Amino acid sequence: MIKRLISALSTLAVIAVLALTALLVGARFIGLTPYSVLSGSMEPAYSVGDLLYVRKIPAEDIETGMPITFVANEHLVIVTHRVVEVNIRTSTQEPIIDENGKAAMGRDGKPIMQEIPLDEPVCYFRTRGDANPIDDATLVHENNVIGVPVYSIPYIGYFVTMLQTTAGKVMAGCFGMVIVLLMFLPEMLQAVGRCEKEKEEEQSHSEEDEQTPGEDTLICEEKTGDDVVVDEKNAPQGDDVLRTAKDAPQGDDIVIEAAENADRK
C-alpha cells in the first residue's frame, strides 16, 4: 500500500514538473514568452498572479484597443497596458545646435527645436491600464514593444514569480530532490525488502544446519545407550550369576551329601 502511494505521488510530481516545464520553456519554442502579472492595473482583463503568454507582432499591426507588453523605462520594467492611441511619425524634433556645440535657447529659456524628416515612419503608442483613470505619462516607441498577450493562465504567475527569488530557487531545488527520491524510493524499498528476506533465509538455513548435527548426536547417544542396556541385560552376569551360584552344589546340598556319607560309614 505504501509503495503504491509513493509511486502515485512520484508520478503526480513528475507530471506537475513536466507540465510546468512545458508552460515555461516549451511555450518559447512556438514563439511565446511568459510573463507574470504583478499589479492590478489591467483588471479585470488580467489579474495579479496571472501568467501571460506574449507573441511578438509587427508594430504596424498594432491597433487601438489592443493590449501590448512593452519596456516602460530605462530600468527595464515590463508593463502590459492597452493602446488608446497610435501615433505614426514621419519626422522628429531635435534641438538646434549653435556654433558652440550647445543647444540654442529661445527667449522662453527652452531649446529651439527643428523638424528632421525620418527615413521611415515610426509608431508611438499611447497606453493606459484598464483600471487606471488616466493615460500613461510617456509614449511607447515601437522598438520598446515586446508583443501582444495571446492568452493567460490564472495563479501560475505567483509560482513563476516565486521561482525568481532566492528562496524560490532553493525550494525548487528541494522539490526536485524530493521528486528524484520519490522516483527511486519504491525500488530502494524493494531492494531493502529483498535483502532482509535473504538475510532471514540465510539465518533460518544456518539455524537448521546447527540443529541437524545435534539431533544426530542425540540419536547416536540414545542408540549407544540402548546398546549398552541390551548388552547389560544379555550379559552372563547379574541374575545368571546368581542362578549359577544357587545351582552350585553348596550350602544345603553339601550338608545332605555329608550326612549320607556319614550313614554309609
Image (cartoon, grey):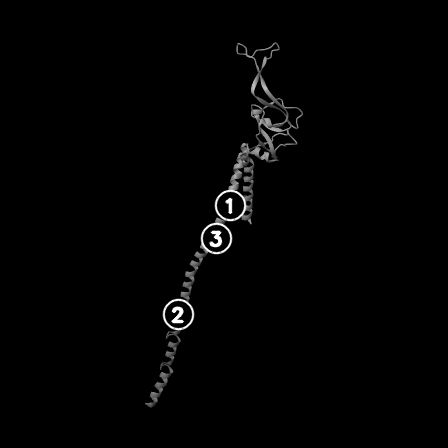
- Say which element carries label 1: helix
Q: Distance of mark 2 from mark 3, alpha carbons?
A: 45 Å
On the image, which quarter does residue 42 sit in? top right
Q: Residue at x 51, y 44 (%)?
A: 183
Which part of the image, by quadrant, shows the C terminus?
bottom left
Image coordinates for residue 169, horizontal then vertical, percent: 53, 34
Q: Amino acid at mark 2?
A: Asp
Instruction: Indicate whether 147 appears above or below 214.
Output: above
Mark 2 or mark 1, whichever is nearer to me: 1
Observer-nearest residue: 1 or 82?
A: 82
State the count of labels: 3
Q: Residue at x 52, y 39 (%)?
A: 176
Q: What residue did someone put label 2 on?
A: 227
Query: Is residue 79 something that shows in the picture?
Result: no
Q: Which label number is shown at residue 197?
A: 3
Q: Distance of mark 2 from mark 1, alpha carbons?
A: 63 Å
Mark 1 or mark 3, whichever is nearer to me: 1
- Say which element carries label 3: helix
- Say which element carries label 2: helix
Q: Are marks 2 and 1 in contact (CB under 8 Å)?
A: no
User: Dot 1, crowdedness within 10 Å: few (<14), some or many (≥20)?
Assistant: some
Q: Amino acid at mark 3?
A: Lys
Q: What residue did someone put label 1 on?
A: 185
Q: Residue at x 46, y 55 (%)?
A: 201
- On the rendered structure, is 97 left or right of 265? right
Observer-nearest residue: 258 or 179?
A: 179
Mark 2 or mark 3, whichever is nearer to me: 3
Name of the residue lying farthest toward the left: 265
Q: Which label number is shown at residue 163?
A: none
Q: Distance of mark 1 from mark 3, alpha carbons?
A: 18 Å
